[in-house]
Image (cartoon, rainbow, N blue to C red):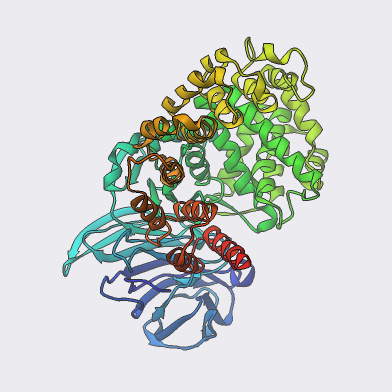
């Protein structure tokens, strides 16, 4: 991997449940990683050490280790025969049952995935972070590519003093080491190797404590101090809620959250150390449109469901994602109320129904199921199950399940058995309908919602696809904002001056669906540019600019200092509209074009680059420099940017 630092010295380990877990028990890893800023495009030899116990007589054991080189491989400090096949380090010896041993070696690696180096070529956004979910940790750390193996990882790091290094466990010490800093982290409990993590970068942090006394540490970029509160809003409340709701104390030593550039997903629940996309680092306005609350709660719930108990295989993946999705919804319910919770369930039921209609529905036990199935159908299973067996049985069963299987691996039957034991009745039919069958039981889901929520009944009643005479009344009277949004989406022509007097959601819907603005609504529509919503401002700016050419200069002047989210959504639109307003001479047109072009450069986040490329393509202005940056994007680690850049390149070639 091309990078501008790295040289680690690891002392670590890992196991393989289905492959050798009945033969060897890897117990504890000590690892030292040395990040050397002077090492450009290379790694140096690193050390590794792991304690293990032999469970059954064997002539070999192995560690997964992808594309690595090894030397000085030693068993209990004596040279040992080994083989490196590019995928595994295999060690040969006459291993006797009951033996407790130590394996150590020096290795060289060059990770092509799982550990990512950002910004070192341009001395810009210098970061290193890892993403090991799946079977990827072995690309940078010798380990076991099996989620069922649990190991205690104690990691040390040496890094240049200007960077923070964040990893699993408690920071035991931080000391000077020849001008660098030695960081020493300690884990007390075992975990699957895919949950090992490290993030390096320029960070500040604040710490608060939960009601149970757990340290909660929130990291942020030094320039983002004003975004800390809106980004991490309700974090402590959600932590306290989940501990109480789940009924089992948070199982790890502390909890940290770290934003990083160009993360592959929304977030990742590394043990005690969630890494998440810095697209969720928002200011007070951005919080209203794109906040971190659901992702925050989801990754936190994984600390119990996935980290404390781990699904044995992809067949039971919903035990992680379904539970995390469900408990995140419960945390949001605690903050935003029952109607919010029910509406989220309604939206997911609609999506699951559409998936079945499209022929893409699968059993929840199909390891190739979609994320929609694992996450949303999994959450629905828990909501339906709780509705069937009652709160008392459900909560006690979850608690028993977590305690019984803590630090081990589980199957769906393990959880269902715990519920049946308390419920006293077989759940065979429930499992068949909600978990095993291919189709999502959409009718049963809607029946539950209608029985449990007046709010959902009202929402379903309000429907203007048939354009009845009642529809205009819906926008005037008692129905919820969600119902009004539905009416506006179906009949935007019904919007009147009075409709603008409703709340945030309704006004945002107006900006989204009323795209051709009647002159009678012009003055009211212009007030949308003052809303505390970057989505509303972006929509309203474009619609006003399109509908009233004579006032384009006014709208551009009013929004000239609005940036928007981290992908600069409002700023990019403003530049493009300015460039396409011939008589608006308040700015240097060439300078604005250069600014837009600059956002396609590799020093910017993937989402911002994609938006910039899209606008340049829309204006047919993707020049030679733009296309060079587009070619560069094809080798990015973010799959969305890679896919986009390849498709746009092909599109541009077809036009030639």
Q: Position of residue 251 (x, y in %)?
A: 46, 45
Quadrant of the frame with the N terminus: bottom left
**Nearest the eye: 249 or 360:** 360
Q: Quadrant of residue 51?
A: bottom left
Quadrant the C terminus occupies: bottom right
Seen in the picture, residue 253 relative to 423 is either above or below; the reply is below
In the displayed structure, does residue 627 sit left or right of residue 424? Answer: left
Horizontal arrangement in the rendering, residue 94 relative to residue 218 (left or right): right
Residue 248 or residue 527, whichever sits in front: 527
335 w.r.t. 363: above or below: above
Kindly tell me whether residue 105 is visible in this rendering. Answer: no
Residue 87 higher or lower than 653, as above or below: below
**Residue 532: image location, x then y, percent:** 42, 28
**Residue extending farthest front:** 583
Figure check: 538 above or below 489: below
Splitting the image into 4 quarters, where does residue 228 fall? top left
Viewer-closest of 65 and 372: 372
Q: Residue at x 68, y 14 (%)?
A: 472
Instruction: List x then y, in percent, for residue 213.
Output: 35, 36
Count the labels in the image. 0
Residue 639 seen: yes
Percent across and percent down for residue 548 are 51, 29
């Amino acid at each position: 991997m091309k990078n501008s630092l790295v040289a680690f010295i690891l002392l670590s380990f890992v196991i393989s449940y289905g492959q050798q877990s009945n033969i060897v028990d890897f117990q504890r890893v000590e690892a030292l990683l040395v990040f050397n800023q002077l090492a450009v495009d290379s790694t140096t030899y690193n050390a590794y050490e792991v304690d293990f116990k032999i469970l059954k007589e064997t002539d070999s054991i192995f560690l997964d280790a992808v594309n690595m080189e090894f030397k000085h491989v030693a068993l209990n400090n004596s040279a040992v025969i080994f083989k490196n096949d590019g995928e595994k380090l295999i060690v040969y010896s006459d291993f006797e049952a009951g033996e407790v041993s130590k394996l150590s070696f020096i290795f060289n690696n060059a990770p092509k995935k799982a550990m990512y180096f950002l910004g070192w070529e341009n001395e810009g956004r210098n970061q290193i972070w890892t993403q090991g979910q799946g079977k990827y940790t072995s690309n940078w750390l010798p380990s076991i590519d099996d989620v069922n193996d649990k190991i205690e990882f104690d990691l040390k790091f040496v890094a240049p003093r200007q960077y923070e290094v964040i990893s699993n466990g408690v920071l035991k010490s931080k000391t000077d080491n020849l001008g660098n800093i030695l960081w020493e982290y300690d884990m007390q409990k075992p975990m699957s190797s895919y949950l090992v993590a490290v993030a390096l970068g320029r960070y500040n942090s604040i710490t608060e404590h939960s009601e149970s006394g757990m340290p909660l540490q929130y990291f942020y970029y030094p320039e983002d101090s004003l975004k800390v509160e809106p980004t991490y809003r309700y974090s402590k409340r959600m932590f306290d809620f989940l501990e109480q709701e789940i009924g089992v104390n948070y199982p790890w030593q502390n909890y940290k959250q770290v934003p990083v550039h160009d993360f592959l997903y929304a977030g990742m629940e590394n043990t005690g150390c969630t890494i998440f996309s810095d697209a969720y680092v928002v200011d007070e306005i951005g919080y209203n449109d794109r906040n971190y609350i659901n992702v925050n709660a989801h990754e936190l719930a994984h600390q119990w469901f996935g980290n404390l108990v781990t699904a044995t295989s992809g067949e039971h993946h919903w035990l992680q994602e379904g539970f995390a999705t469900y408990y995140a919804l419960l945390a949001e319910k605690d903050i935003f109320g029952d109607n919010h919770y029910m509406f989220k369930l309604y939206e997911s039921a609609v999506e699951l129904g559409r998936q079945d209609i499209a022929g893409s529905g699968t059993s929840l036990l199909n390891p190739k199921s979609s994320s929609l199935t694992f996450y949303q159908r999994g959450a629905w299973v828990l909501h339906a199950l709780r509705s069937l067996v009652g709160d008392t049985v459900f909560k006690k069963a979850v608690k028993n399940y977590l305690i019984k299987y803590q630090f081990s691996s589980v199957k769906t039957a393990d959880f269902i058995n715990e519920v049946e034991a308390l419920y006293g009745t077989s759940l065979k039919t429930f499992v068949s309908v909600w978990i095993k069958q291919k189709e999502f039981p959409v009718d049963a889901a809607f029946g539950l919602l209608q029985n449990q929520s007046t709010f959902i009944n009202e929402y379903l009643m309000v429907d203007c696809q048939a354009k009845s005479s009642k529809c205009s009344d819906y926008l005037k009277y008692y129905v919820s904002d969600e119902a009004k949004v539905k009416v506006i989406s179906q009949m935007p022509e019904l919007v009147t001056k009075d409709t603008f007097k409703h709340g945030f959601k309704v006004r945002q819907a107006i900006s989204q669906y009323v795209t051709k603005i009647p002159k009678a609504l012009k003055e009211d529509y212009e007030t949308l540019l003052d809303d505390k919503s970057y989505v509303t401002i972006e929509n309203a700016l474009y619609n006003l600019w399109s509908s009233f050419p004579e006032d384009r200069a006014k709208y551009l002047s009013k929004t000239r200092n609005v940036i928007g989210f981290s992908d600069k959504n409002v700023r990019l639109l403003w530049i493009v509209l300015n460039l396409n307003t011939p008589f608006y001479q308040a700015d240097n047109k060439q300078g604005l074009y250069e600014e837009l072009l600059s956002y396609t450069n590799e020093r910017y986040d993937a989402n911002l680059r994609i938006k910039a490329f899209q606008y340049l393509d829309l204006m047919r202005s993707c020049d030679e420099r733009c296309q060079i940056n587009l070619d560069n994007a094809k080798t990015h680690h973010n799959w969305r940017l890679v896919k986009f850049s390849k498709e746009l390149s092909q599109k541009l070639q077809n036009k030639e």
